Amino acid sequence: MPDRDANPLIVAISSRTLFDLEASHALFEGDGIDAYADFQRQHEDDVLEPGIAFPLVRKLLALNEGAPPEAPRVEVILISRNSADTGLRIFNSIAHHGLSIKRAAFSNGAPPFPYIRPFGADLFLSTHAEDVRNALAAGVAAATLLPARAPQHRHDQLRIAFDGDAVIFGDEGERVSREGGLAAFAAHERAHAGEPLSGGPFRGFLDALHRLQAAFPTGIDAPIRTALVTARSVPAHERVIRTLREWGIRLDEALFLGGRAKGPFLEAFGADVFFDDSPHNIASARDHVAAGHVPHGVANG
């Protein structure tokens, strides 16, 4: 029986983020559901290649090493628009790759996002933008991972990077910047430096990730490393630092880039995934790391 007191980090993912299903998805788009279903049945013993989220999932599940099976530190749940029948190939591939994924929801073409909250997910990753928007609207941190070659990093650590405004924090600063420009934004942040920023859609996930980090020793060799990668610069840095201090949240690294392209910095950090609300920043990041678009805030209004 599961440990009722266990409080794992729960990440829900779609099958197209976990495995490379782009060829079969193109078949679905071109020839319909019956052709897709026939193809998956014919190839259900053919192992699927890793998708964009595969390295992230492997590192997440590795954090369970040493934890009792009934009380894992991390749980990954599959949320899929496949049917259970066509999903057999996916579970065969999960078994082949040795991934400890035990729970799943197959919605057979219907929107699967209603099942995310009952599973208690702290984060939802999908290639389906509408499902991501619906999950965000339901109060779950969510991002759209765009299909791409999964990057290979030299780090054994799980490394996660976040944008600040409209991701970790609310989009108040972005609204001020859009309405009055950078000078107005800088003046606003100086005037409110002592006031904590409001929480954004990833505040809850950040809390859960911080709780998971607390289960391990701190320091450069800790198995999880986090970074804030923001376009903010001095003097707008102060409010960010004070807010994280107020929340009791530790971010291991903070990069205040003052508008510089984020991609090269994310590659230098070695991010397994980066979350940002700006399509422009996601385009820069995708050339270097797996990037999740968070369709939230004024930039996505």
Image: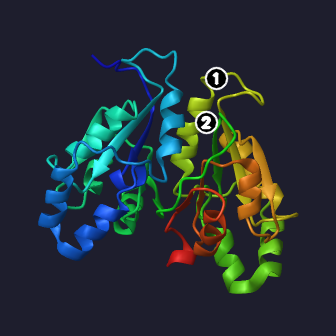
Q: Nearer the viewer, residue 239 or 10?
A: 10
Observer-nearest of 138 and 57: 57
The mark lying in front, picked from 2 and 1, is 1
What's the coloring here? Answer: rainbow
Q: Residue furthest right?
A: 234
Going by the numbered disc 2, the residue's amino acid type is His
Q: Are the residues at dot 2 and dot 1 in contact (C-beta closer than 8 Å)?
A: no
- Residue 163 pos. (x, y %): 66, 59
Would residue 160 appear left or right of 258 to someone viewing this image?
A: left
Picture layout, residue 20 above or below residue 231: above
Q: Amino acid at mark 1?
A: Phe
Foreground of the two, 217 or 5: 217
Q: Is residue 223 above or below residue 163?
A: above
When the figure is inspected, residue 179 is found, relative to residue 98, above or below; the finding is: below
Residue 254 % position (x, y) = 78, 50
Is residue 241 visible in this depiction of the protein?
no
The tag on residue 216 is 1
Which residue lies at the image location 75% right of the left edge and 66% below the top edge? 231
Category of crowding for the residue at label 1, using alpha-carbon neighbours closer than 10 angstroms: few (below 14), some (14–19), many (at least 20):
few
Q: Give the residue at x 51% y 63%.
A: 294
Q: Is 154 situated left or right of 49 in this image?
A: right
- Residue 132 x/y as whole percent: 40, 62
Q: Which residue is mark 2?
A: 210
